[in-house]
Image: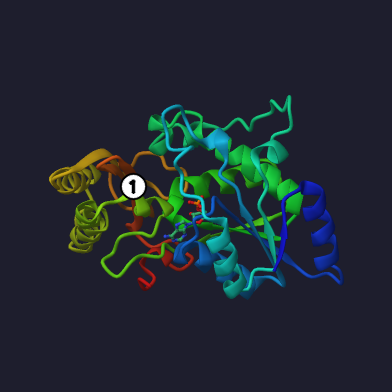
Amino acid sequence: MRRVTTIVETRAALAELRRGGRTVGLVPTMGALHDGHLSLVRASRDRCDVTVVSVFVNPTQFGPGEDLDSYPRDLDADVGLLESAGADLLFAPDASEMYAEGAETRVELGPISTVLCGASRPGHFAGVATVVVKLLGITLPDFAFFGEKDYQQLKVIERVVRDLDMPVRVMGCPIVRDEDGLALSSRNRYLSAGERVSARVLSRALRRLRERIARGEVDVSGLTRALADEVSGEPGVRLEYAAIVDAETLAPLVRLTSPGRALVAARVGQTRLIDNVAVGPVPAEADTAVAPLS
Ligand code: AMP
């Protein structure tokens, strides 16, 4: 795997790698890689001839008082994992490479970015969308791979690509979980042993929610209350939101008679965790949210 840190080197390396019409897959990450990230690398390898991974802790998507400075960074370990997963190119720029002095342009998003995580993290998705648009412009991939773990982010990026006519296919990949159900996240390393046990409540509550729905409940306010009660009933866990929304627009639902998504965000100690599952009728394509936990 080749490692580059500048935009010029990335473009040159990819011009070489895509010779002969080879397809390129991009996997954007913030590093501190785990099996969730590596599942995206594998998906890209399955689909594309060349896989480029970016590792960049993007300052513009962190708000004041958030964990930008303490966000886990371990580039040496990341390199080893990416080598063994078979990535072809690693782009690991620093902030001054990505944001030249005087850069002031930001992607402006619609209401999809102000609900759920966007309500408590103002500007977060504009920061995400801006860096992703830049990464797409730098790497010009045929496909870009994102995890359903960050479901709102995936839907925001799909919308940006559609609304701005960007020539890339956005691929959503299922959430990779630990054996006990906890969705893998770089932030899980902040959790103490006790918090790690409490954190299971997120996936457990979402699983119970799906059981209720399977028994025929469709009233979204009752279902949402049950989800919220279960998460906030766990000692040491502070619920930020629990919601059941339209799977595409993230708009509120009243009855669960169309494809939906149930999402939760909570603080476990100081650590903010998120999780989500597909709920309601399965859309035309396969329901990947219930893919085997691995
Ligand atoms: P991050 O490094 O947290 O910005 O994540 C980079 C990409 O990996 C995003 O598209 C995430 O949705 C995805 N990702 C993170 N955790 C998981 C997981 N447990 N399962 C699947 N994808 C994930």
Q: Is residue 287 visible?
A: no
Res 121 → quadrant:
top left
- Picture quarter with the C terminus: bottom left
Relative image position of residue 119 (x, y in whole percent): 40, 31
Residue at the front extreme of this rendering: 76
Q: Is residue 11 visible?
A: yes
From the viewer's perspective, is 119 left or right of 99?
A: left
Relative image position of residue 257 (x, y in whole percent): 32, 53
- Picture quarter with the N terminus: bottom right
Relative image position of residue 40 (x, y in whole percent): 54, 64
Res 59 → quadrant:
top right
Q: Residues within 10 Å of mark 1 (few under 14, many from 20)?
A: some
State the residue position of label 1: 273
Please, is residue 237 above or below residue 146 in the view? above
- At mark 1, the secondary structure is strand
- Could you tell me the amino acid type at mark 1? Leu
